[in-house]
Image (spheres, coloured by chain):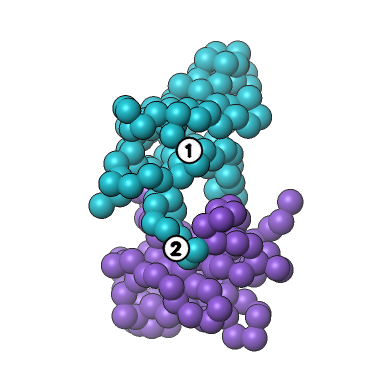
Chain colours: A cyan, B purple
């Protein structure tokens, strides 16, 4: 079945460091890919999404490119801030019906030190 | 932005009891979802609901689970009877459109502890 893999459980950086969170996916069709961010005490919020292979999604300084060849959708940010500390989930939607489901990765906990 | 509310934020019950988790979705949304997250594991889809009907459910959505949204009020997840393995955080989500829009708004979750 469809799946999303995030191998990094936790990432600790200092402010202004470069962020790279690895995500790979597995599906037999053409999914839409997402990154969600979850702050403490809140539900996940959509950060960015990409519907078409080889396109890049950009939001709030974060970017991710949907690479069909490597089945990857890594999240990057050039310079992180302490306020970026949160859990980041890679996710995909498959299927072609209106009542869809989101398949989430395990999440990567980003901790940015001041 | 639009907010999804979940009531209660925490619930502790004894195994075998019934529990109802309540979700107040975004007011004009049409599609509703429940997800389950066991501590330290990924969030997993349980069920989606549209126009008064379950459209799709996962294998985690056991026979003891049911959902409804009577008269446009809360979207509820009922578990009867509960089991120890039902302990988790349950997230509700809603969306205006289906696949065409594809943006779900999530609530903050209800932490359910079954003793």
* Closer to the camera in the image, B74 or B103: B103
Q: Mark 1 points at which residue?
A: A52
Is A1 left or right of A38, judged from the image as shown? left
* Closer to the camera in the image, A4 or A13: A4
Q: In this view, does B40 lie above or below B64?
A: above
Give the mark nearer the N terminus: 2 vs 1. Answer: 1
* Closer to the camera in the image, A71 or B100: B100
Residue at mark 2 shares a chain with residue at mark 1 = yes
Residue B6 placement (x, y as % from top left)? 60, 65
Say the numbered circle drawn on residue B80.
none
Q: Is residue A6 above or below residue B1?
A: above
In the image, what residue occupies the spot 59% across and 85% down?
B70
Can you name the residue that lies furthest to the left here?
A1
In the image, what residue occupies the spot 74% across and 51% down?
B1
Q: Is residue B108 visible?
A: no
SS of the residue under disc 1: loop
- Are the residues tagged 2 and 1 within 8 Å (C-beta)? no
Residue A29 placement (x, y as % from top left)? 33, 47
Residue B44 placement (x, y as % from top left)? 38, 56
Is B30 left or right of B110, judged from the image as shown? right
Q: Mark 2 lies on which chain?
A: A
Q: Which chain carries label 1?
A: A
**Mark-to-mark CA distance, 2 and 1:** 17 Å
Quarter of the figure with residue B60: bottom left
Q: Mark 2 points at which residue?
A: A97
SS of the residue under disc 2: loop
Mark 1: give few (<14), some (14-19) or many (20+) Cα within 10 Å.
some
Mark 2: give few (<14), some (14-19) or many (20+) Cα within 10 Å.
few
Can you name the residue that lies furthest to the bottom here?
B71
Residue A55 placement (x, y as % from top left)? 50, 30
* Closer to the camera in the image, A96 or A18: A96
In the image, what residue occupies the spot 44% across and 63% down?
A97
């Amino acid at each position: 079945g469809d799946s999303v893999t995030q191998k990094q459980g936790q990432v600790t950086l200092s402010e202004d460091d470069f962020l790279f969170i690895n995500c790979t996916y597995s599906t037999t069709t053409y999914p839409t890919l997402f990154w969600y961010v979850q702050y403490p005490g809140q539900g996940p919020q959509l950060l960015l999404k990409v519907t078409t292979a080889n396109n890049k999604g950009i939001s709030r300084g974060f970017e991710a490119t949907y690479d069909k060849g490597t089945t990857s959708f890594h999240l990057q940010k050039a310079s992180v801030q302490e306020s970026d500390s949160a859990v980041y989930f890679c996710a995909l939607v498959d299927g072609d019906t209106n009542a869809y489901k989101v398949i989430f990765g395990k999440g990567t906990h980003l901790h940015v030190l001041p | 932005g639009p907010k999804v509310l979940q009531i209660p934020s925490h619930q502790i019950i004894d195994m075998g009891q019934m529990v109802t988790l309540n979700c107040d979705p975004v007011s004009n949304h049409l599609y509703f979802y429940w997800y389950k997250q066991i501590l330290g594991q990924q969030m997993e889809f349980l069920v989606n609901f549209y126009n008064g009907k379950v459209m799709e459910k996962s294998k985690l959505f056991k026979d003891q689970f049911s959902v409804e949204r009577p008269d446009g009020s809360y979207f509820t997840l009922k578990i009867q009877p509960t089991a120890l393995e039902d302990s988790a955080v349950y997230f509700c989500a809603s969306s205006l459109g289906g696949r065409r829009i594809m943006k779900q708004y999530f609530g903050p979750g209800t932490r359910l502890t079954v003793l």
